Amino acid sequence: MQCDPETSVLSRGKVLLGGSPLCLLTLSAAGGGVWEALLAGQPVGEAGPGAGALARRLVEAGLAHPAPPPPSPGCAAGVTAVLPVRNHAQGLGRLIAALAGRCAEVIVVDDGSTDGTAAAAAAAGARVLRHERPLGPAAARLAGAAAAMTPLVLFCDADVLPQDVLSPDVLPPDSDWFGVLLGHLADPAVGAVAPRVASPVPPGARAGLLARYESARSPLDLGPRPAGVRPGSRVSYVPSAVLLIRRELVGFDPAMRYGEDVDLVWRIVGAGWSVRYEPAAVVHHRPRATWAGWARQRFGYGSSAGPLAARHPGPLRPAGQAAAVAAAALAIAAAPASPVAPASSRGSRGRRANAMATAVSALPFTGAPRPRWRVVRRREVACVVAAVTAIRSVVTAVRLARRLAAAPRPTRLAWVMVIAGRRYALEAAADNVRRGWWPVLATGRPGRRVLALSVAVPAARDWWVTRPDVGFLPYVLLRFADDAAYSLGVWWGCARARTACPLLPASRPRAGGRRRGRPGDRG
């Protein structure tokens, strides 16, 4: 077992703070000893009484991650590789050869190709299933899984290759991406596991701006930290570009063109199974070759929000606290004017109507010309929002300190959690502005100021931390274009599905940490 890099060990190992959603776990003296034994590398069965239950709790909370042992010899005989392919004859033989040495069988589902895909797959030794007309990747995966005879299925897209095939010289001799994935399935509670899908620039290659940006911000690359996958957490989905799954759990919805993998993962988790993201296993994905294809990909990922919301209404709705922060920012930016007479000329009923009219006029958040007077000024609204936030923070800290009375230094722990929660809320609010509400904000000058702030600050911080091989200004502009294409897809998908769930705040706040809540979202 390994501790998550962002887990804070406090009070000499008695208190753990971290995970996603953010949580605090207080350990007893015996639990602290088991925790130290697990971190030292002792197997769960030898770490002490209650080690199994504690390890499961730590993993489910995201405070720690399993380090499964290497799979036993012969385990690969229980895996069938399924490749859904359409018009991808070039390079297909190389992928089939890489998988044939690890899996019992390789099945290629030719989804209505018009080139030599079927012939190339057969020549490489794969079993070929053919659709006379394109039925979509979900239907192709279902057909391949139905033809498999093994308990495990490895789905693999045609535009990926394992890292040990592309870059064998930079890997340690014992590196085995397939064995790392297979080890997780030794746990009977794990239903599926996915590797890291990266898009690195090959060493020595002269890459263009698109390839360099994709290397830093690929929507399929979920980062270097392992995670349990569930809605509302830091890693809320995994793509099916490469996915190792138990065959009885395969149930893609063929009606979905995008987001079918997110839908499947959420249904698996909802049924009580665990899904893991394992970045120690790395495969390389070939990014889109043109800017038009890049924009279509982002738009398509966003368009899945509507159909997903129809099947899973809760996870795609903005979290209550984060949505409240974003809504306050919109209200401050819009500085709405009331169309009714000044409150001083009316009674209490008139003041209530005045306040109601002010609230209603804030809903469109447009930049239309305003009357010469306003009921509420931007500065006044900002002061009210700041005061309410401060009061809520103090109240929350006091309540948490009472609940943590048995822990060492409860007041300090309470404030650490409150500050972390406010930071997560602001980050999520900026994300909702960029990837959901920017078409509304862009209609007026005040809204554009909020939008610019929500774009520039996270992008600048991300550029400073990651230092991609892209200049600062191109990086910021491309991130905005990335989010804009995704957001337009969200609105389009919502219109087609006749739902506004991905754009409306949840009725109740969800406990949360920083999350990757939407398909194709890198956070």
Image (spheres, helix red, strand yellow):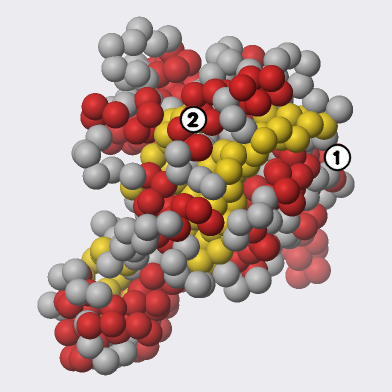
Of 453 and 189, nearer the camera is 189
Mark 1: which amino acid?
Answer: Arg
As drawn, the residue found furthest toward the left would be 12
Q: In this view, does 180 lie above or below 108?
A: below
Q: Position of residue 36 (x, y in %)?
A: 17, 76
Report the residue at 21% width, 39% height from top: 172
The answer to whether marks 2 and 1 mark residues whose Cβ atoms lie closer than 8 Å is no
Q: Is residue 248 above or below residue 398?
A: above
- Single out the mark in the foreground, 2 or 1: 2
Check disc 2: other Cα within 10 Å, few if <14, some if 14-19, many if 20+. Answer: some
Of 479 and 347, nearer the camera is 479
Figure quadrant of the N terminus = bottom left
Q: Does residue 237 appear left or right of residue 87 in this picture?
A: left
Q: Can residue 279 be seen in this view?
A: no
Residue marked by disc 2: 97
Q: Position of residue 398 (x, y in %)?
A: 36, 81
- Residue 507's tag is none
Q: What element carries label 2?
A: helix
Residue marked by disc 1: 496
Of 79 and 325, nearer the camera is 79
Q: In this view, does 425 lie above or below 493?
A: below
Check disc 1: other Cα within 10 Å, few if <14, some if 14-19, many if 20+. Answer: few
- Separation of marks 2 and 1 at Cα, in angstroms: 41 Å
Mark 2: which amino acid?
Answer: Ala
Q: What element carries label 1?
A: helix
Q: Is residue 444 above or below residue 288?
A: below
Q: Does residue 181 appear left or right of residue 122 in this picture?
A: left
Mark 2 and mark 1 lie on one chain; the one further toward the N terminus is 2
Q: Is residue 1 visible?
A: yes
Report the residue at 34% width, 10% height from top: 205
Report the residue at 53% width, 42% height from top: 242
